[in-house]
Image (cartoon, rainbow, N blue to C red):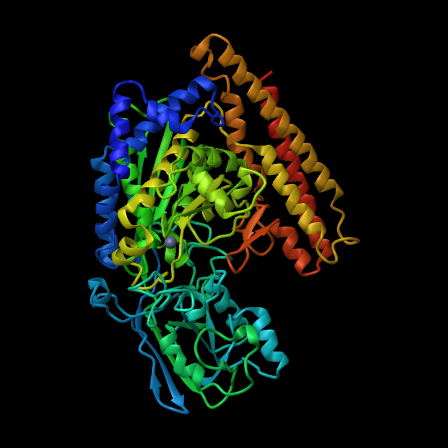
Amino acid sequence: MRKSLFRHAVVLTALGAPVWTLAWQGSDPIPGFSASRAASQRTLEARLVAELDTETTGRFFRYLTEEPHPAGSERNYQLAEYTRDRFIEYGLENVDLRRYDVYLPFPRSVSVRMTRPVEYQASLKEDGYPVDKDSYASEVGITYVGMSASGDVTGPLVYAHSGNPEDYDWLESQGIDPRGKIAIVRYSVPYSYRGFKAWEAERRGVKALIIYSDPMEDGYRKGDVFPDGPWGPESHIQRGAISYDFIVPGDPLTPGWASVEGARRIPIEEARSAPRVMAVAMSWRDAKPLLENLGGPVAPHDWQGGLPITYHVGPGAAEVQVQVDMDDQVRPIWVVTGEVRGSREPNRRVVLGNHRDAWVYGGVDPSSGSATLLDLARVLGKMAREGQRPDRTLTLASWDAEEMHLTGSTEWGEELAESLAEETIAYLNVDSSTSGPDFTAVAVASLSPALVSVLRDVRDPNTRGSVLDAWRRLETVEEDVDLVDNELGSGSDYTVFLNYLGIPVVDMTFDGPYGVYHSQYDNYYWMTHFGDPGFRYMTTMAEVWGRLALRLANAEVYPFDFALYADRVDGFLAALEGQPGVAGNLDLSAAKEAVAVWSREAVQLNQAIESEMTRQDGGAGQEATAPGRFREVNELLLQAEKAFLLEDGIPGRPWFKHVLYAPRFTYAAMSLPGVQEAVDERDWERARSQLALLTERFQRMSEILRQAATSLR
Ligand SMILES: [Zn+2]
C-alpha cells in the first residue's frame, strides 16, 4: 500500500511536477530555509521518500535478526562487515571499519539454586514455541547480566521491591538488614536502569542481586503474551548490563580516552564503572518458587506484584546460592562509518547513528533501527550518485557494544573528539526505530522546532495524517514543540555527543506495547506479528531521520532556536527554586537574569535571521541567497552548545562536561546536575559555586548570540 503510493510520487516527480507531494506537505516554512530554498528542499525530500522501500527494509531486517548477535560475537563482526559492504555498494565515501579492544566479559556459568526449605534449581532458560523457529534456537547461550561480578555466595533471601533506596530504607525500618543477604527485586515501570539497582545493592552490602520480570510490569497483567500477543511470556528473561556508565561510559579500562591499540589501560579493580556485586536476571516463572518461600512480614501493598501469591519480604526459611563465573576478557568490537560527502561544505557534518549489537536476535532493539539505517544509506547513496548530494556531509554510523557500556560510540567519540567537536552540527540517534506506532523523541530544545517541522511533513502509515498530528493525539500540550522532551538522561549512544563533546542531539523512536525487551522473543516473529508488520514504521523512521539530516545539511542558516532553549532553561531554574531549602540558601537572581539576557539576544538573532531571509526572498529571487551571507552566523551557532561545557566536568563525574544535563544513576534526566547534586546533598557552598559557573555559561551563550546577530547587520 505505502509502496505503491511511493511509486505514484516518483512518476509525478519525474514529470517535473511533484503535485501530490506538495499538496500533502503544504508550504509551511522550513526552519533555516528561505521560501525559495524550502521549495527545492521539499522536492529533494520527495525523492528520498519515493526511494525508501518497505521491502528492502524488510530484507535488511530479516538478515540482521537471523541469528543472535551480541557484542564480541562472531556474528556481530559478520554484520559489521555486511554493513560496511552495503555502505560501499551504495556509494558512501570514507567507509571505515574501526576496531576497539574493550573489556567485554562473557559468562562461563551462571546458576541460582534454592537450598532451603526446598531444593530448587532455576532454569534461567526461555521456552520454545512451535510457531517461531527462533525461540528453539540452541545458539542463544547462557543467560547473564553484563558486567556482573563473579563469585559463589549463599545466604538468606529478601524481597526488596524495585531495589531503589527507599525500598531498602523501608526494609531497614522494619528491622530487616539486607547486608550479607541475597536480594530479589523486580524490573521497574517506568523504566529504571538495572545498573542503578546493582549500585544500590552494592552500597547496601547485598551479596548477590536477582532481578526478575514481574507480570505486572511486562507480562500477562498487561495483555496477551507471546506468541499470541506482544507481552512477555512466563519464561521470558530481560537480559542487560549493570555497568555504572552513569559515572563514566565506554570501556571501563580507558575512562576518558579511546581503547585503540597501545592505549593505556587501568586495572579493572580501579575502574569506577565496574560493579563489584553479582547479578542474575530471571523470568517470573523461575522467580515464583523463590518468592513463595519467603517468610517474614507481608510486603506493602504497592510491592505486591502480578503473581497469584501474597508477596512477603523475608527473610525466612528461603536460602539461596548464586554462582556467577565471568571470563573477564578484553574483546574486539567494531564501529562502521560511511559518509555522503557534502558538495559545498564537506567539513561540516551531521552524524546519524544506531547500535548494531543485540542481547539476542534484537528485533526491536536494535535491528529495527539498523534496518532503518541501511535503507536510508541505500537511498542517500543512490541520490548522491545521481547528483543529489547535500551541501554538508552526512556521516552514518553503526555502533557496537552499546548494550554493555555505550562502548562503541563512546570510544569513537573519544578518539575523534577534536574533529567531531569542530565539524559536527548535530547527532541524530535512532536506537530501536520501532516497537509500535507512537512517535516519541528527546532533544536539546534548540532542535525541537526543526524536528517538529519534519514531523509535520511525514505521513503516518496508520492514521494517514501527519506523524505530528498522530503524536498530538497522544499528549496534551499547548504547542507542538512541547511534544519534544527536552530533558535528556542516558541509555543510548547520544551520550558521548551531548555530555562529552557538547554537540546538539536528537533521539527518536516509534513506541508501542512491548513486553519482550532484551529477551529471545524480541525477534523477527515478534516484529512481523506485533511491532511493525509490513515494516511501515521502520520506513517512516527512515523518512523522519533522512529529512531531518538533509535539512540540517542544506539549511542556509542552522535551524537552532536558542530562544526556546532559554525558555526551557528558565523552567529548570524555576523547578530548582521550588525545591525545599533552596530559598534562603541559594540566590538564583543572577542566573535568572543571565537567562533573560540570553533569551533577549536569541529573540533578536531570530528576528535578524528572519528579516534577512525575507529580504532575500523579496529581492532578486533565489540567487540573492548569497552563499556565505550566513557563514559567520553558522560558525558561531556551530560552537554555541559548547558554551555549556565545563572543562573539569560536574563534581565527581569529570567525564560528564555539560552543565545542563547529566543522567541520574537511574538513567533518568537530571537538569543542572552540578547544582542539583549539591542541593540534594545540602552542600550550599558547592551549590553556590556551581551556580556561579552556570551563570557564566549563560553569559557566554548570550555573547555568542549577540555576535551572531551583529554579523548580519
Ligand atoms: Zn538499544
Horizontal side of 22 relative to 569 (left or right) equals left
Give the total number of marks visible in the rendering.
0
Farthest residue to the top: give it.
Answer: 620
* Along the line of sight, the residue nearer the viewer: 26 or 118: 26
- Residue at 49% x, 45% y is 473
| Residue 61: image location, x then y, percent | 25, 49
Residue 703 position by quadrant = top right
The residue at the point 48 percent across, 60 percent down is 191
Answer with the quarter of the image where residue 232 lies: bottom left
In the picture, residue 352 is in which quadrant? top left
- Quarter holding the N terminus? top left
Is residue 435 positioned above or below 126 on the image?
above
Ligand 1's quadrant is bottom left
Please tell me which residue lies in front, 463 or 379: 463
Pick the residue in front: 681 or 58: 58
Q: Is residue 184 visible?
A: yes
Task: Please state the horizontal and vertical placement of residue 87, each as a whole percent of the image.
Answer: 25, 38
Quadrant (top left/top right/bottom left/bottom right) for the C terminus: top right
Name the residue at 24% across, 32% down. 91
Say which residue appears at 75% left-offset and 42% top-offset.
589
Q: List x then y, in percent, for residue 705.
A: 60, 28
Q: Is residue 145 above or below residue 120?
A: above
Whether residue 470 is situated above or below residue 123 in the rendered picture: above
